[in-house]
Image (cartoon, grey):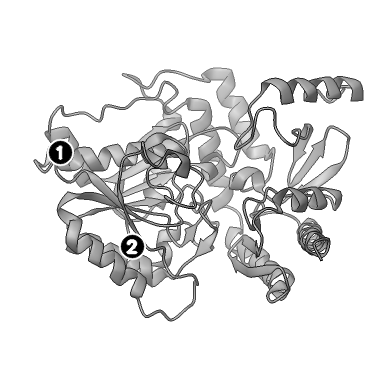
């Protein structure tokens, strides 16, 4: 594709716009997709030969940037021997070795691993586990979920039902989705002193409905696609206590936060808690190939195995794909042998210095930084396309949504490129706001 001519590329883009549906887009899309020919590190090469700094790490997945040599080497070795084999009745070394790493690194007690294809499916499996757990214990009435507003857990039907019911991307389906309970979103602020009104409101719902609540679902510390909101660790700590008090399972969705994004290996570590079920995705293979996992405590597997029908009836065709498992092993090994914590602090410090000064600027509602996450929340919610186009002119790739302009770069992004990223982002935001005056 690198030798594709300009006219050839235009034909490809025209065909794409006419026939290919992109994420969260009309058909045909309002804005044509941008052709890409190459990725390397934190640089994306576009079809018109421009090079731009990636501020999104491929939707938060490419922890080490693109084309990491050790991950690529592991994948090359695996594809030469066994790129895929069904997991029903078979096992293989990459799956076993990856399970070992996940159990060793994840919060205590999570010692059962179920491999799936994507984050949404990992959450589907988590929900199925929670529901079947109570059925197996003879309490089928515990068949609802409790979650918080401003959350996001995926695009499949079970997960859509626990995304924000009003402002979420799936509110269109609210009348046909399963009905669950929603508590107010946690109070914003990672370091705040709180009066705990939010947790008290959640407790009130639990107190009234715990007999038919199977589990609470939560994105630890960072609510991602539902609003890029950061909240205090003590909320999560109290939530764990309430689950124990009211005999409800806790499902922690670490699909976006797992493997270091917030400054801890898992966001649950900020509150020093272990969930009953934990989901991983996005970051698991470092953005090289799709893979996700649902981890559970032993009590979950015991209950399901001893109840009827005695199995977890779920089995994706590409479950525990050896190629993806090898990529994940290499990704984790690269992460754990790198100065990732230093890199997160470096990025956080730079974001604080470059983005937080925008607080109070007309047209900007809020600016917040946590770990390798920088967020600018605009007063208006319809400026994403303009900001994206302006950033691209500045040599930066962003993907704003709603009123949120945010960046989650690769951990090893060079400082010069990080500077280009924030300079281009800030200029794009200010230029866009200024054109409205």
Spot occupied by residue 206 in the image (x, y as percentages of width and height): 22, 61
Above or below, 410 relative to 323: below
Residue 371 appears at what percent x and percent y? 58, 64
For mark 2, give the secondary structure: loop
Residue 215 in the image: x percent, y percent?
A: 26, 50
Disc number lying in front (2 or 1): 1
Residue 241 showing in the rendered view:
no
Q: How many marks?
A: 2
Tell me if I can see residue 165 in this picture.
yes
Residue 334 point in image, percent of width and height:
59, 47
Q: Residue at x 51, y 50 (%)?
A: 256
Q: How crowded is mark 1: few (under 14 residues within 10 Å), some or many (20 or more)?
A: some
Residue corresponding to mark 1: 135
Question: As rendered, which of 373 and 199 lies closer to the eye?
Answer: 199
Residue at x 81% of width, y 38% of height: 45
Measure the C-alpha gap from mark 2 to mark 1.
Answer: 26 Å
User: Who is closer to the viewer here, 109 or 428?
Assistant: 428
Q: Which residue is drawn at the image coordinates 17% and 46% (left, top)?
A: 142
Secondary structure found at label 1? helix
354 to the left or right of 282: right
- For the point 21% across and 28% down, the residue is 311
Which corner quadrant holds the N terminus?
A: top right
Q: Which residue lies furthest to the left in this view?
A: 138
The residue under label 2 is: 273
Q: In which quarter of the image is residue 121?
A: top left
> Crowding near pointer 2: few (<14 within 10 Å), some, many (20+)?
some
Q: For residue 31, which quarter of the picture?
A: top right
């Amino acid at each position: 594709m690198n030798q594709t001519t300009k006219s050839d590329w235009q034909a490809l883009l025209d065909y794409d716009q006419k026939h290919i549906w992109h994420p969260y887009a009309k058909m045909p899309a309002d804005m044509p997709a941008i052709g890409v020919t190459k990725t390397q590190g934190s640089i994306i090469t576009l079809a018109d030969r421009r090079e731009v700094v990636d501020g999104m790490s491929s939707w938060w997945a490419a922890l080490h940037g693109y084309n990491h040599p050790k991950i690529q080497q592991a994948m090359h070795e695996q594809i030469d021997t066994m790129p895929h084999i069904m997991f029903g009745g078979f096992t293989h070394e990459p799956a076993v070795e990856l399970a070992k790493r996940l159990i060793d690194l994840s919060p205590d007690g999570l010692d059962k691993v179920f491999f799936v294809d994507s984050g949404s499916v990992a959450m589907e499996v988590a929900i199925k586990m929670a529901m079947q757990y109570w059925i197996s214990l003879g309490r089928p009435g515990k068949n609802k979920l409790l979650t918080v507003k401003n959350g996001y857990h995926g695009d499949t039907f079970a997960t859509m039902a626990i995304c924000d019911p009003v402002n979420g991307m799936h509110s269109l389906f609210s009348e046909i989705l399963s009905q669950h309970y929603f508590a107010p979103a946690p109070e914003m602020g990672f370091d705040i002193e709180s009066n705990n009104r939010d947790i008290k409101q959640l407790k009130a719902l639990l107190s009234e409905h715990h007999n038919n609540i199977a589990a609470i679902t939560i994105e630890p510390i960072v609510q991602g696609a539902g609003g890029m909101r950061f909240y205090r660790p003590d909320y999560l700590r109290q939530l764990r206590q309430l689950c124990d008090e009211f005999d409800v399972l806790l499902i922690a969705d670490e699909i976006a936060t797992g493997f270091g994004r917030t400054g801890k290996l898992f966001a649950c570590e900020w509150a020093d808690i272990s969930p009953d079920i934990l989901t991983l995705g996005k970051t698991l293979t470092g953005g090289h190939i799709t893979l996700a996992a649902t981890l559970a405590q032993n009590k979950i597997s015991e209950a399901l195995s001893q109840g009827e029908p005695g199995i977890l009836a779920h089995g994706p065709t590409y479950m525990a794909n050896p190629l993806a498992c090898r990529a994940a092993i290499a990704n984790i090994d690269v992460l754990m042998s790198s100065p990732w914590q230093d890199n997160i602090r470096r990025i956080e410090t730079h974001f604080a210095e470059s983005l937080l000064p925008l607080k109070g600027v007309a047209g900007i509602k809020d600016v917040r930084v946590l770990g390798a996450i920088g967020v600018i929340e605009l007063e208006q919610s319809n400026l994403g396309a303009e900001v994206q186009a302006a950033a691209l002119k500045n040599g930066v790739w962003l993907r704003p949504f709603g009123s949120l302009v945010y960046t989650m770069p690769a951990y090893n992004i060079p400082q010069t490129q990080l500077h280009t990223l924030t300079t281009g982002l800030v200029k794009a935001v200010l230029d866009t706001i200024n054109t409205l005056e």
